[in-house]
Amino acid sequence: MPNPKTMHVVVQEGGSTGELYAHAFTTRKDADRFTRSCAKAAYRATAPVEVPAGTDIDALQLLLSAVGDELM
């Protein structure tokens, strides 16, 4: 299987804490499944966003953590 050119990122809000978490998936189907599971568990989450496969998810998580801290 060739390397994917894109991945799908979902940002989830962590319940009462307001923290933000980045989750990356190699397929849109898996990202959609995760988004539905968040909704069932009453967690807010974004729709999947397509990003280049080389995107640094750890750096994105650091950015989301800083944003989440500012919102609190």
Image (cartoon, rainbow, N blue to C red):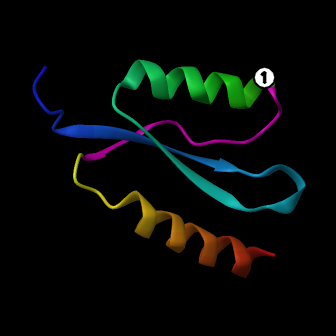
The residue under the point 66% across, 59% down is 20
Is 50 within the magenta?
yes
**Figure quadrant of residue 16:** bottom right
Classified by dominant secondary structure, the portion drawn in magenta counts as: loop
Is 24 within the magenta?
no
The residue under the point 77% across, 39% down is 43
The quadrant of the image that shows the N terminus is: top left
Q: Amino acid at mark 1?
A: Lys
Number of marks in picture: 1
- Residue 70, compared with residue 57, is above or below; it is below
- The image shows residue 56 at horizontal and vertical percentages of 33, 61
- Which residue is most to the right? 16
- The image shows residue 7 at horizontal and vertical percentages of 31, 39
- The image shows residue 55 at horizontal and vertical percentages of 29, 57
Query: Mark 1: few, some, or many residues within 10 Å (few <14, many ≥20)?
Result: few
In front of the other: 61 or 35: 61
- Which residue is most to the front? 1
- The image shows residue 26 at horizontal and vertical percentages of 34, 31
The residue under the point 23% across, 46% down is 53
**Figure quadrant of residue 57:** bottom left
- Residue 38, compared with residue 20, is above or below; it is above
Q: Residue tagged by mark 1?
A: 40
Residue range of the region highlighted in magenta in the rendering: 41-52
In front of the other: 64 or 1: 1
